[in-house]
Amino acid sequence: MKLEQVIIIGAGPAGLAAALQLHRYGITPRLIEKARPGGLLWNANWVENYPGFPAGISGANLAQVFLDHAKAGGVDVTPAEVQKLAWDNQAFIVSTNSAVYHARCVVIASGTKPRQFTEFAIPDILAGRIFYEVIPLISSSGKTVVIVGAGDAAFDYALNLGKQNQVIIINRSNQVKCLPLLWDRANTCSNITYRSRVVINQLLPNPEGGITVECFSPKGLMKLSADYLIGAIGRIPQLDFVSASVLERSSEFEKAGILHFVGDVKNNIYRQTSIAIGDGIRAAMHLNKVLKETAHESDCLDRKRRYRRSIYR
Ligand SMILES: Cc1cc2nc3c(=O)[nH]c(=O)nc-3n(C[C@H](O)[C@H](O)[C@H](O)COP(=O)(O)OP(=O)(O)OC[C@H]3O[C@@H](n4cnc5c(N)ncnc54)[C@H](O)[C@@H]3O)c2cc1C
């Protein structure tokens, strides 16, 4: 059984940064990614708070810069989905859809997953028209997209899709939670309409093949006709693959420096690229220290064993 030094789960900004920094120490981690490396950034319209890009940069271009940088630093990505992370008293066991790996240390950089619609049924026939991220629709044009939400993601998605499509943002309350600058930009985009106090009652297929979004509104029942519906109603940590026993003992493993949670998966409301990157670098620095110490201990043990063998010969 080959024991990997470090396995990193997720090649978003946090995982890429951790991998890059480990390479600088001469440690080659196995970086596992189930989708497109680069993470959630592919969904971001325009990133203006990542230092080094004074004019801002699109999320997609920033993701590509990170990937180019990681590649230049020797980082390789193993394409696979981690289905289970367990512990067998000596090492972590990382089971993917294609292989099982054993690792001394693990970095969980798996980000978040979207909250799904639960208050209304989604007819099977419409399942392919409902999304929770913008990426699947990024090249669509001339379509009508209803976006549900009131935060940064809803408005960022609207600004992205509103370049080539008609977008209707619906918000169940009359409070907008996005950055004022996103609100201002959405207001000046003629392709974006915003409606407050609108709640979806049901989704129906319409004769053109799209969706009739039936909603309660202050003016009564309202029907919106759309090609697609996007939910931007929040995200939660992506930890489905972590076994209950690892979760239970996570503080103990973290204290020992062999398990690290980095980036959005643990950052609650502080989900930002620069923070995720910082987390990744810090975890790698800590891992380098831990691995050096354990290597030193096993060197000493080896030397002791060799000495004992030599005196008993
Ligand atoms: C619309 C939008 C706009 C944004 N704008 C900005 C902005 O302007 N500025 C800013 O700083 N940040 C912005 N962000 C936030 C930024 O994208 C995140 O903070 C950042 O991507 C977090 O990086 P991460 O590596 O922690 O997680 P993620 O980017 O989510 O990466 C996690 C990775 O783990 C992978 N993964 C998950 N589970 C598994 C598994 N079981 N097996 C293998 N791989 C797995 C995922 O596929 C993903 O690639 C925005 C986000 C969105 C959605």
Image (tube, grey):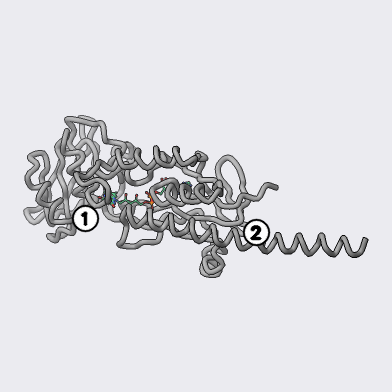
Residue picked out by circle 1: 151
- Which is more N-terminal, label 1 or label 2? 1
Left/right of residue 7 with respect to residue 278 in the rendered view = right
| Crowd around label 2: few <14 · some 14–19 · many ≥20 (10 Å) | few
Quadrant of the rendered structure where residue 128 is? top left
Quadrant of the rendered structure where residue 161 is? top left
| Crowd around label 1: few <14 · some 14–19 · many ≥20 (10 Å) | some
Q: CA distance from mark 2 to mark 1?
A: 47 Å
Q: Position of residue 137 (x, y in %)?
A: 27, 36
Quadrant of the rendered structure where residue 97 is? top right
Left/right of residue 70 with respect to residue 269 in the rendered view = right
Q: Position of residue 159 (x, y in %)?
A: 17, 43
Q: Position of residue 266 (x, y in %)?
A: 40, 61
Identity of the amino acid at label 2? Ala
Q: Do the CB atoms of the residues marked 2 and 1 lie less than 8 Å apart?
A: no
Q: Quadrant of the C terminus?
A: bottom right
Secondary structure at badge 2 equals: helix
Disc 1, ligand 1: is the CB inside 8 Å?
Answer: no
Q: Nearer the viewer, mark 2 or mark 1?
A: 2
Which is nearer the eye, 26 or 59? 26
Q: Position of residue 126 (x, y in %)?
A: 30, 38
Residue drawn at x 64%, y 57% is 91
Left/right of residue 120 with respect to residue 91 in the rendered view = left
Task: Decide if residue 201 is in sight here.
Answer: no
For residue 110, which numbered disc appears in the image?
none
Residue picked out by circle 2: 295
Residue drawn at x 9%, y 42% is 189
Task: Decide if residue 59 is in sight here.
Answer: yes
Secondary structure at badge 1 equals: loop
Q: Is residue 104 above or below residue 61?
A: below
Identity of the amino acid at label 1? Gly
